[in-house]
Amino acid sequence: MTQAQLQEAANLPSHGTEPPQRKWRDYFTFNTDHKVIAIQYLVTGFIFYLIGGALATVIRTELATPEPDLVDPEFYNSLFTLHGTIMIFLWIIPAGVGGFANFLLPLMIGARDMAFPRLNAVAFWIVPPAGLLLMASFLVGPPQAGWTSYPPLSLIASQAGEAIWILSLLLLGTSSILGAINFFVTILKMRVPGMGFNQMPLFCWAMLATTGLVIIATPVLAGALILLAFDLIAGTAFFNPTGGGDPVVYQHMFWFYSHPAVYIMVMPFFGVISEVIPVHSRKPIFGYRAIAYSSLAISFLGLIVWAHHMFTSGTPAWLRMFFMITTMVIAVPTGIKVFSWLATMWGGKIRLNSAMLFAMGFISTFVVGGLTGVMVAAVPFDIHVHDTYFVVAHLHYVLFGGSVFGIYSGLYHWFPKMTGRMLNETWGRIHFALTYIGFNLTFMPMHELGLLGMPRRVAMYDPSFTSLNRLCTLGSYVLAVSTIPFLVNAVWSWMYGPKASDNPWQALTLEWMTTSPPAIENFEVLPVLATGPYDYGYGDRSSEVNVPFSEAKDPVLSAGPSSVLRAEPDPAVAAHPDDRVGESQNRE
Amino acid sequence: MQGSTIDSAKTVLNYHHTAEATAAHHEEHPDLRIFGLIVFLFAEGMIFMGLFIAYLTFRLMAPSWPPEGTERLELLLPGINTAILISSSFVIHQADSAIKKNNVSGLRLWFAATTVMGAIFLAGQLYEYFHLGFGLKTNIFASTFFVLTGFHGLHVTFGLLLMMAVLWRSLKKDHYNSEHHFGVEAAEIYWHFVDVVWIVLFLLLYIL
Ligand SMILES: [Cu+2]
């Protein structure tokens, strides 16, 4: 019996009859089921991704020629402002944090739902109105100050659009905080008996670190936006030096949130990758604790590096040194993760399916983004490339090469569980190839453009940059086209794809120990951990049963003297250490 | 692995089929609400923290504080107000002790008293607003003063609404008892939070 069979045998997934299915109408209502909310987040996010992508395509088309001939420069400002805002606040954060965490957390820890299901639904239903509100700014003149919205620029240009931008962001921030409170409490308090912190799947660890950041950092952005709104609407001078204020205070408050926001956007996918890679490499994860604890280290360090965005804002030299060093130190926990993933794949029986391809794509592109991150952390280098296309390249290697590749990897991996249908593998690979080529073609040349000194956020550029820009624009079209196979594949498979079995990847984590899609309350009975989350490749070697001995209140689960688990101590899987023969191979 | 001791048929718990489990699902998880509230208040506290640090930064950068020509803040009324707000925290705690002894009328009495004290605080705050020698846009000190106290006042107002909601619900027979009184506890914790924020605010704006 393999470990997967052992785990499955311990958890009878379905109750014989068909699991109660959701009707399509449920997805358009205020529903408290975390799985419904997850799909609402993912689909809403994806719609905004398409809008943000369309804006990006217009931007790249404009940049195909040095002159501003397609749109007028003012509108160009609005395009990149809304592109950035939508991609960050309406796509990666809702889809990544809201979507995946909602679907996976309760299933992975064996809970029936979130700790606060109604709050969860409230958090989601803030997102579509906030998104529509932001879109409505097109009617009054959209904001032009970039997604960072630095004063004094944001106080001068298209003020009505700016006010809408602030309101929309305050709503999205509230949604994000309410969601994070739910995830935080759920992870800490709702785990199935016998699942200690070190038996949690790594995605849960990643989300624990992410939600911590959301709860600490997002409120500070709200504070900054409140002050900015007063400056904009009431005419105060918080960020205006003529009235005794200081625009740099805004920058500090903004980046206190927005640097951690990078980790809020990418850490969930560190978690996703940590799930996908061991499953499809058929090997235990390398360095479970190293990956788990390095997430916490990244959260902590992520909170004390924000001013690396402000090396050119008159930050004193000694302070720049501090932020330079802390920023570079983040490469250490990140590197630990990368090497752990590589070591997990090393010598594994790798299945090169779409999920795994995107996971490997994630590592390769994210490493580039990470390395350029260390480069821009160095003060002298940063002063040279500040506000050039080098920064644009770095950011997209982190947020597209990282987060979006991670989203795709997760979607290919969990689509069977979410919908009960398999995605088409061939189209998945075509999607990956187009995305990978298109992505690198779009953003790799931007490194050179930045080093040559092409400034970002300007509609026109020196004609000597034309050929590299043409390359970027070409790449962006490939990237735009790459979405089509995915979209068609997802919609078609959802309706007509082959039915998925409960555990198509022979995975061990608990979300696979129920039906596909999971029944409305996830598990018929409380799930039992018969193996660790990553005990792949052990064949019929068995491990300990992961239920606490005697102290838990429930005799069935506690493995206490009267437990069914102890009825006939099998030497291979006995719960009590004295009854066990042979050492467990997998636990530290 | 024949004869495995893990027989899923035996590990079936009947929990799922009990009425309790079905009813519990669409409710918020009862034992975790207080913890969730504390996490929420922590996030709320971070907004104040951001605003406090912004205030201190403006203050440290200013050549003189409050800027030349700003009328000095009067201390008597805000001092009395502070005393009222701080003592209301002890009053609301009496309500908690009362409901733990199943004493609903005690709960109503102490909640009503706290609500009145909170309302007096708000009224005093408004009185101060209208009798200050500066307005929102006078200078950076005045702006931060109004935004900080105003944002806190918003929280006080919300606290009053919370307490009135508890009072309203307590009219229903046996809505709160010694076992189930989340609403009472939540309002109390929230009120303590509002109180602590005010103490920091008072020290920063009036004393320091
Ligand atoms: Cu940063």
Image (spheres, rainbow, N blue to C red):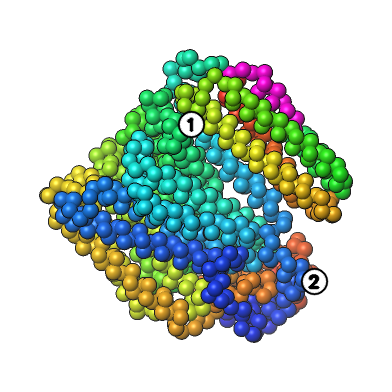
- Magenta region, main secondary structure: helix
Nearer to us of marks 1 and 2 is: 1
Say whether residue B160 is left or right of residue A451.
right
Residue receiving disc 2:
A562
Q: Is residue B86 magenta?
A: yes
The residue positioned 50% from the left and 65% from the top of the image is A40
Say whether residue A460 is left or right of residue A262.
left
Please provide the residue range marked out in magenta.
B73-88
| In front of the other: A585 or A536 | A536
Q: What kind of residue is marked 1?
A: Ala
Q: Chain of mark 2?
A: A
The residue positioned 56% from the left and 67% from the top of the image is A29
Marking on residue A348: none
Quadrant (top left/top right/bottom left/bottom right) for the C terminus of chain B:
top right
Q: Chain of mark 1?
A: B
Can residue A265 be seen here? The reply is: no
Residue B111 location, x and y as percent?
A: 78, 40
Give the structural element (helix, strand or loop) at label 1: helix
Say whether residue B16 is left or right of residue A537.
right
Marking on residue B54: 1
